[in-house]
Amino acid sequence: MSKTTIAKVVGILGIAAGLTIGTSACAPANSEATSAVSDSAPKTVSVPITPGAQEKTAPAVSSMELTAGQTPEALAKDYQAVTTDWVNANCSPGTAKDFLNQNGVTPEEYSLKIATEEGQKRAIALLGSNYESNPDLKEYAKNMIALNRDVLNLYIRTMLGNTQGNGYVQTYVLDSLTSSSVDGATTKIVFEGHLHNNGTDFPNVVQPGPTDVKESYSLTFVKSGNTELLTQYQ
């Protein structure tokens, strides 16, 4: 996702999850609220989730990486899959079950802890071990962690007392590849996509808002061993 998309969605989800998101979370101070948490949304755990939830498990690091040597089209799809997985990281019945076992911890506090731990691994896999030396990539990782935190918070809230076994999720759909170029180990891609969420499935938790956010953006990847690393985004 692009810098603008990530900042925009972090602002939207922060408000939807009942959080205070400002410039400290790399979201614009004037971010518009397009959805909000319902007054009836649970603030703490008081009801059970679907019985039989599996234990929370950690994904393999290889699933967080981009495979080198792909065509621009395949790389674009791989990027969308990896970042969509990051946005929804740990949104599973097992995580919701683990949350219920915590004492005196709010969904916000739990989501922040889990997203921060997860984000460190995923940032290195997608951006490289030295990503923090690049201010733009450091900001990208910070925003992705904040986005995962907010999605996970909403997921947990929508799983409380949910007998259907599904919760709030975000997906990114690649609509079209508008241009691409390969120069040695560097691949540049410009494409269009839209971010979709299922917030309308949970009217008691998430108030109505847009389910699709469309945007075009440009990404630069550099081959590093058997993986492609994101080095620039706009």
Image (cartoon, grey):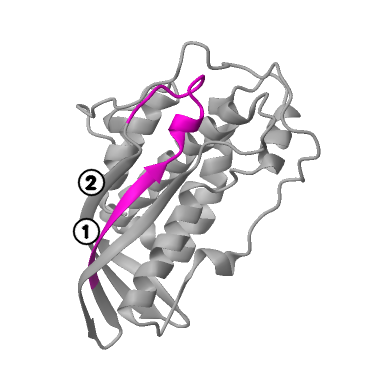
Percent x, y of residue 78: 43, 69
Amino acid of disc 1? Tyr
Classify residue 214 as left or right of residue 167.
left
Secondary structure, mark 2, is: helix
Magenta includes 92? no
**Residue drawn at 40 percent across, 85 percent down:** 69
Dot 1, crowdedness within 10 Å: few (<14), some or many (≥20)? Answer: some
The numbered mark at residue 126 is none
Residue numbers of the magenta segment: 189-209
Percent x, y of residue 20: 37, 22
**Residue drawn at 52 percent across, 63 percent down:** 64
Secondary structure, mark 1, is: strand
Classify residue 106 as left or right of residue 57.
left
Magenta includes 199? yes
Q: Quadrant of the N terminus?
A: bottom left
Amino acid of disc 2? Thr
Percent x, y of residue 185: 30, 84
Classify residue 227 as left or right of residue 104.
left
For label 2, the residue is: 4
Could one spot residue 83 in this view of the protein?
yes
For label 1, the residue is: 217
- Is the C-beta separation of discs 2 and 1 under 8 Å? yes
Question: Residue 21 is drawn in which quadrant?
Answer: top left
